[in-house]
């Protein structure tokens, strides 16, 4: 192996690095390394002149490898590898030494910071000495996308992708698409009817030639990687043929089984055979097998007898279908933080304490009470209604640390709608502060306070309990410093938004990360907000973080644009930085097979074999192997050993 | 109470009928009372087998040796090897099976239950015999009986039993083809990890002083590695003298071999060796305690492995060698694992 000619390029990053690190000294120290042929420092290495100078230096000095000591490789590894390629050398002989995030930003002492920057840079110079030139692996792309979750986010993403001429499979767990938005009454700040806005889109999804809708279906297993995923979807039987069903409603009239209606948040009941909403897509009934007496004509069979269209088929079986797709959008939405977790709010055991979604159904014209606000316990019109914001949100000690973002707005909307329905009623809102950033949002809240005469009380509620007909709400008004007691007829809790169970499950199935609050993690909080940490899997809607409808729609559009960009390529370049087995050292213990999150390793004749199309180069196998029998290319044990040596020297 | 004749009869039968090509068990040794490993292929020698409190050796080690030897000789004889295995030894076999070291049908486990006892610790026994050298040892109820020149000496088993046996949670070989003795799982002679906890009761300074002495004393004879059935790697990552050179070894490979540890037996190198070994045994060590027994300079090696075992048990509810299909400690990730960073 002939000696390398490495160039080291030290970036000041303005004062981001230069304030804490003596960059000139770093460059000088690196020049003493015997494989370093050229060093240079520059104020912004990533600027156009900075990049040009790197390219020129590679050419002028016949460099064969490059170390750029600057910020995190997350930001500029690709930039400088592309430059290396432009200069005519292999891009995988270029490495980044991170002296910003891992050094200057976290240290204050310039002398010590400089020492550390030197060690980091030197370790990368040593690593690059043993880097091999590698070529990206070209893989074909499956030009088809899958959207998981049929709420507004999924619907929008599916439509946008389909309109670009790409086939989309939209998978929804429930019997209808529409998701949470279909449960809302009116939407802030314009107060237009949620279902009226949404249902044209739902119909469009159903009729779109490029969209294949799979409702009542769940994603079970995902294999493969960006460009070529293989997804197993379980289609649960609905026992009703949607093509034959005439929605005549005769079946529900005869069905003897009554269960709580989850689509109405248990405010009323439904039959075992049901249609979630009048607007449901597909427009068809579904037979809930858990509630049904048992699909046995001897036991019941009433629905089948009465169905003139012959749409009911008790022999329908669950089906597992396998779909190949190139990209996946995850739009699995949110749930509300359970009332049972809120002990101070009665723990879900006090009657007439509703959550925000239940209240939506109560004021919705299509809801359980046909739009009349009647409290569930006695169907009387409540005259004193207390709305409580931040229930479960912004409470790091006991509940969720984050702000659920939409509650200030929908609580104001609830108060307004309540006053519209019950003009002589009194609405009280407990709040911590009002967060109404958004077009027309602040004005909306102001109108609720002023025009609708809603009493906003700044403070929290410490306790509520049932006292006869009333609910006693004990709170504080911190502006007057007084304790407040309200005898309410009904209480509405603006519960925190949490990732839905479907989101939690899909994260495991897709092996995409979740953040500390359990929402799906984006690849970069600022620069890659709609991409998951796994290539080819994109995020949309409240599964990623609490957000309102306009934001969700915007994010869905962004995710769709990413999918379209990805799938418009003929082939994809996969990183060649993947695992490689040393068969002489492999004992075939299979620990790497178990550890691999991408199912990319298998045992063959007692030795591990890496599937290059699946390996993501994460290094889990290498960390697990006791025998150093598996390495990631260009991050070999030897390189790590020499890096450690460089740091300790 | 195990009747040794049952084991002998089984061994003789299996060899005579060709159901096993070899029986690995214990026989009377040549050094005082100690039993030694016996490799029996002739049915007539089956009567050499013994079962007494000096049957320390974890015989699963010899399954590893056998496999390596056959690979070296390029031989592939038919039929399983029958091996006498205590609870801990059987768990070692399970770990080897989990790691696909050999197939289940290649081994016939003659399980022996330690019942209410275990093996003797010579270091505990010596001071109680007033310098006399015993020539035999035997189980007798809750006692061990030692034969010395001065006659028989009866001692309560608990007084002279090895720590690992006192703390043993499962003295019964759950995985077996045939088992001798009763299942006394759940007997609690001493709390699990008691020796470790006694040591940990000291403050950090005292502990460091003690370990410094131990690490200074280690001479890296690798006896601990040699008796360990889990240390079956051909190349030990921390020992450059085990790097194999084969026809396929390239010059570059030879030139770039990593020396994680220097050859000299100094404190820092010894620490790295013993710590790395403990890490590599995490989730695999079944606490047979052979490393500590074999150590010529009394380094409490078992304590290092025990510490990892307790950690795995407390954090992940992990029991090494519990079942063949069971998970591996370091390669398995569960949603219920502590630490959210990996989700």
Image: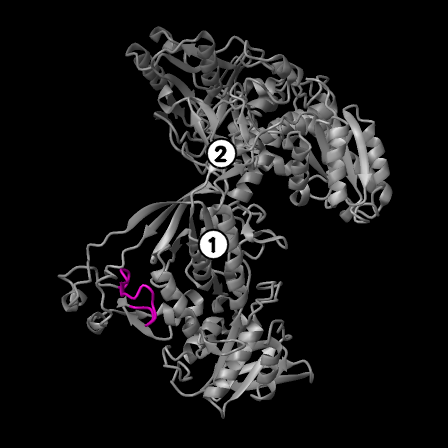
The image shows residue A346, relative to residue A166, as above or below, that is below
Give, as a single range, the part of the protein colored magenta: A275-291
Main SS type for the magenta part? Answer: loop
Answer yes or no: is residue B336 visible: no
Say which residue appears at 41% left-offset and 66% top-offset: A201
Task: Please determine whether, in this image, residue A219 is positioned above or below residue A462.
Answer: above
Please name whichever residue, A174 or A207, is drawn nearer the observer in this view of the structure. A207
Residue at the (40%, 34%) spot, across then down:
B325
Instruction: Give how far across and how far down residue A603 sits, in percent.
Output: 44, 27
Q: Residue furthest bottom?
A: A424
Front residue of A649/B239: it is A649
Q: Which residue is mark 1?
A: A330
Residue density around tag 1, few if under 14, some if 14–19, many if 20 or more, within 10 Å: many
Q: Which mark is residue A632?
A: none
Task: Look at the numbered disc 2 and give the secondary structure of its residue.
Answer: loop
Q: In terms of depth relative to the viewer, which is nearer, A450 or A70?
A: A70
- Residue B117 included in the magenta stretch of the image: no
From the viewer's perspective, is A288 left or right of A571? left
Residue receiving disc 2:
B320
Return the chain for callout 1.
A
| In the rendered image, the vertical position of residue A418 relative to residue A577, given as above or below | below
Relative vertical location of residue A530 with respect to residue A264 in this rendering, above or below = above
Asked whether residue A289 is drawn in magenta, I would say yes
């Amino acid at each position: 192996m002939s000696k390398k000619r490495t160039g080291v390029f030290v970036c000041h990053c303005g004062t981001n690095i230069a304030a804490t690190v003596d960059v000139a000294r770093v460059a000088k120290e690196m020049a003493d390394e015997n494989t370093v042929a050229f060093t240079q420092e520059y104020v912004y290495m990533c600027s156009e002149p900075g990049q040009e100078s790197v390219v020129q230096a590679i050419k002028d000095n016949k460099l064969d490898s490059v170390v750029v000591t600057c910020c995190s490789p997350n930001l500029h590894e690709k930039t400088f590898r592309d430059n290396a390629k432009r200069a005519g050398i292999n891009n995988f002989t270029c490495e980044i030494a991170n002296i910003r995030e891992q050094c200057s930003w976290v240290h204050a002492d310039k002398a010590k910071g400089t020492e550390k920057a030197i060690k980091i840079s030197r370790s990368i110079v040593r690593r690059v000495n043993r880097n091999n030139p590698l070529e990206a692996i070209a893989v074909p792309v499956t030009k088809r996308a899958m959207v998981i979750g049929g709420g507004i986010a999924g619907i929008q993403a599916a439509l946008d992708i389909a309109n670009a001429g790409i086939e989309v499979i939209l998978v929804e767990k429930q019997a209808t698409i529409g998701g949470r938005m279909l449960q809302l009454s009116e939407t802030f700040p314009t107060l237009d009817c949620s279902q009226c806005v949404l249902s044209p889109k739902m119909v469009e999804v159903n009729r779109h030639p490029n969209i294949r809708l799979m409702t009542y279906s769940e994603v079970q297993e995902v294999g493969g990687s960006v460009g070529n995923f293989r997804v197993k979807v379980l289609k649960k039987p609905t026992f009703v043929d949607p093509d034959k069903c005439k929605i005549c409603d005769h079946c529900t009239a005869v069905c003897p089984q009554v269960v709580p209606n989850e689509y109405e948040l248990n405010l009323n009941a439904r039959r075992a055979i049901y249609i979630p909403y009048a607007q449901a897509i597909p427009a068809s009934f579904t037979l809930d097998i858990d509630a049904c007496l048992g699909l046995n004509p001897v036991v019941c069979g009433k629905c089948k007898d009465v169905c003139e269209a012959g749409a009911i088929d008790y022999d329908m079986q669950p089906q597992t279908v396998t779909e190949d797709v190139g990209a996946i959008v995850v739009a699995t939405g949110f749930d509300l933080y359970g009332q049972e977790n809120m002990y101070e709010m009665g723990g879900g055991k006090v009657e007439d304490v509703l959550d925000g979604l239940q209240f939506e159904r109560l004021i919705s014209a299509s809801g359980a009470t046909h739009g009349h606000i009647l409290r569930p316990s006695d169907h009387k019109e409540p005259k004193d209604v207390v709305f409580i914001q931040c229930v479960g949100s912004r409470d790091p000690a006991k509940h969720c640390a984050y702000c659920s973002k939409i509650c200030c707005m929908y609580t104001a909307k609830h108060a307004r709608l309540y006053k519209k329905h019950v003009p002589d009623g009194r609405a009280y809102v407990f709040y911590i502060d009002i967060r109404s950033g958004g077009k027309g949002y602040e004005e909306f809240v102001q109108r609720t306070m002023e025009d609708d005469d809603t009493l906003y009380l700044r403070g929290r509620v410490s306790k509520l309990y049932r006292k006869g007909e009333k609910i006693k709400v004990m709170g504080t008004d911190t502006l007057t410093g007084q304790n407040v007691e309200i005898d309410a007829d009904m209480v509405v809790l603006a519960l925190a938004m949490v990732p839905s169970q479907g989101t939690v499950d899909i994260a495991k199935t897709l092996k995409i990360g979740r953040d500390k609050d359990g929402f799906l993690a984006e690849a970069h909080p600022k620069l890659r907000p709609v991409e998951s940490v796994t290539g080819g899997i994109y995020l949309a809607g409240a599964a990623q973080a609490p957000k309102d409808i306009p934001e969700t729609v915007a994010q869905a559009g962004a995710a769709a644009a990413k999918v379209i960009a990805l799938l418009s390529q003929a082939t994809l370049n996969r990183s060649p930085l993947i695992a490689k087995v040393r068969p002489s050292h492999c004992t075939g213990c299979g620990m790497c097979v178990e550890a691999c999150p991408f199912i990319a390793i298998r045992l063959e004749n007692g030795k591990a074999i890496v599937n290059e199309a699946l390996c993501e180069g994460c290094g889990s196998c290498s960390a697990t192997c006791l025998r150093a029998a598996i390495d990631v290319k260009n991050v070999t044990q030897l390189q790590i050993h020499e890096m450690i040596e460089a740091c300790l020297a | 109470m195990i009747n040794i004749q049952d084991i002998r009869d089984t061994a003789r039968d299996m060899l005579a009928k060709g159901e096993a090509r070899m029986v690995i068990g214990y026989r009377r040794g040549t050094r005082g009372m100690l039993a030694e490993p016996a490799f029996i292929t002739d049915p007539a020698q089956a009567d050499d087998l013994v079962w007494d409190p000096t049957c320390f050796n974890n015989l699963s080690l010899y399954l590893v040796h056998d496999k390596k030897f056959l690979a070296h000789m390029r031989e592939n004889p038919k039929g399983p090897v029958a091996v006498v295995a205590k609870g801990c030894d059987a768990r070692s076999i399970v770990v080897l099976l989990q790691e696909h070291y050999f197939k289940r049908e290649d081994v016939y486990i003659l399980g022996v239950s330690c019942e209410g006892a275990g093996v003797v610790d010579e270091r505990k026994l010596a001071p109680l015999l007033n310098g006399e050298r015993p020539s035999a040892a035997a189980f007798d109820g809750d006692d061990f009986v030692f034969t010395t020149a001065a006659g028989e000496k009866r001692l309560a088993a608990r007084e002279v039993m090895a720590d690992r046996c006192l703390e043993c949670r499962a003295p019964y070989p759950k995985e077996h083809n045939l088992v001798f003795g009763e299942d006394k799982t759940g007997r609690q002679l001493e709390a699990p990890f008691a020796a470790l906890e006694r040591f940990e009761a000291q403050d950090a300074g005292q502990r460091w002083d003690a370990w410094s002495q131990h690490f200074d004393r280690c001479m890296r004879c690798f006896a601990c590695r040699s008796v360990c059935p889990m240390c079956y790697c051909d190349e030990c990552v921390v020992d450059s003298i085990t790097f194999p050179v084969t026809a396929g070894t390239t010059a570059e490979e030879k030139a770039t071999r990593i020396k994680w540890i220097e050859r000299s037996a100094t404190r820092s190198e010894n620490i790295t060796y013993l710590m790395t070994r403990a890490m590599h045994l995490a989730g695999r060590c079944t606490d047979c305690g052979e490393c500590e027994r074999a150590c010529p300079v009394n380094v409490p090696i078992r304590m290092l492995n025990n510490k990892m075992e307790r950690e795995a048990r407390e954090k992940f509810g992990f029991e090494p060698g519990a079942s063949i299909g069971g998970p591996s400690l370091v390669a398995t990730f569960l949603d219920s694992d502590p630490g959210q960073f990996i989700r």
